[in-house]
Image (cartoon, rainbow, N blue to C red):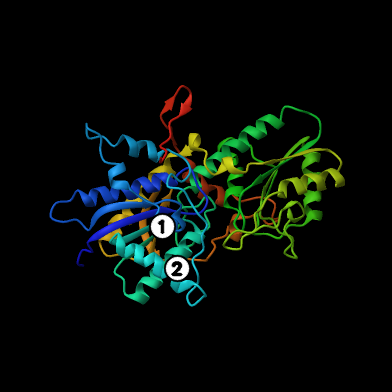
Amino acid sequence: MEILHGNAIVGQSGGPTAAINATLTGVIRGALDEIAKEGGAGITHLYGMRNGVDGLLREDIVVLDELFAPDADGKYTALDRLTLTPAAALGSCRKKLPAAGAVGEAEIMDRLFAIFAKYDIRYFFYIGGNDSMDTVAKVSAYAAKVGYPIRVMGVPKTIDNDLVGTDHTPGFGSAAKYIAVTMQEILRDTAVYTVPAVTIVEIMGRDAGWLTASAALGRLVSGIEPDLVYLPERPFSHEQFFADIRKALARHPNVVVAVSEGLECADGTLVGEGTQSGAVDAFGHKYLEGTGKALELAVKAEIGCKVRSIELNLPQRCAGHLVSDQDITESLEVGRNAVVAAVSGVSREMMTIQRVSSEPYAFEIGHEDIFKIANQTKCVPAEFINEEGNHVTDECLRYLLPLIRGERYPEYKDGLPCHWILK
């Protein structure tokens, strides 16, 4: 295929993770390799959009190939530091582009494509999760509609692990590792007392319970796990929950429970609805919080024992001090291969990770049609949840374990990690 000459731009969108900058590093390295090629590369410059498409519409962009040029001694020190910097270094957004034919679509999309033309953008890389893939699909469709030559690539990122078409998503392994380690530490802490008590740990997961499932990984490693695990894939019953708690208390005094923030009752009512603000984001998603607190109050009223709730909240997304080496390795490869694929002619696709085997673990990088992925949700399959709906199976844990293996530590100075920060 004929090489498409021009500039590239990359952005980050949605919730930050501990590995999204590793993916950005992969894109930058791939672009730098193209720029350095003799005889005319497909990519001339790599731009970065601050705060995703929201910033791009304001022309708030930076020239990344200049920011990350090699040092005088030929080393890429800044890129190495960026790799292990948590959160989105370029900034993020949750801007929803208008649907085809909607009011305001032509105005916004024409503005976007005028900016593409102004900066000769021929390659568009967008790193994000489900909502970000919606943006990739819309940009792809509009480019085809107006006949603008550009290659548009979705580059996956989400701790929720809920993108279809890929075995798992960059960022998930590190979040799962943090949750698994934190749960082991909570279990050590609560086990020292003999007073009957229940500890409820609330973990992120709106529609998919992958992260909450990872709380049980200790079963395969130490043999110690939370007593109960509840995922949003199963309707939640307070009556069954109370019965499960009583059975666990009969076995030992210190009961630990992992719950997804998105738990719903059979009638569709969110378990934590009474403690939530009701506010929604640009994509119509409710801000979820308070599921653990609601269950804490319910257990206190129903059973009357000592009870506390712990909401892991933001730390589970960007724990850069406790990343999975496997996750960082795959994130880098996904980003770099996105550039390779686009320059070779691939467009309107999302990069994917395909599992070749679990033991020993092996993977391959591929890509799939963005229109088969955008606005779909990959939930935890039925065979990964036990019959009672209050825990996960060994099959689930064997799927998860390879994704959290290995450690990679950032550079430290005076006891604190060194991060790369865009000025």
The amino acid type of the residue labelled 1 equals Leu
Name the element at disc 2: helix
Q: Viewer-proximal residue, 259 or 364?
A: 259
User: Quick check: 187 above or below 122?
Assistant: above
Q: Say which quarter of the image contains residue 237.
A: bottom right
The image position of residue 224, as x and y in percent, is 63, 37
According to the picture, the residue beneath numbered tag 2 turns out to be 108
What is the count of numbered marks?
A: 2
Answer few, some or many: residues within 10 Å of disc 1's Cα (few below 14, many 20 plus, some between 14 and 19).
many
Name the element at disc 1: helix
Q: Residue at 44% x, 58% y: name it.
A: 53
Lateral position of residue 102 relative to residue 24, left or right: right
Seen as rendered, the residue at the extreme left is 39
Q: Viewer-proximal residue, 365 or 223?
A: 365
Q: Say which quarter of the image contains residue 119.
A: bottom left
Q: Residue at 28% x, 56% y: name it.
A: 340
Q: CA distance from mark 2 to mark 1?
A: 11 Å
According to the picture, the residue beneath numbered tag 1 turns out to be 56
Marker disc for residue 97 = none
Q: Residue at 35% x, 75% y: name it.
A: 146
User: Quick check: 169 above or below 186?
Assistant: below
- The quadrant of the rendering that contains the N terminus is bottom left
Q: Viewer-proximal residue, 129 or 124?
A: 124
Q: Say which quarter of the image contains residue 3.
A: bottom left
- The quadrant of the rendering that contains the C terminus is top left
The image position of residue 227, as x and y in percent, is 70, 43
The image position of residue 277, as x and y in percent, is 71, 54
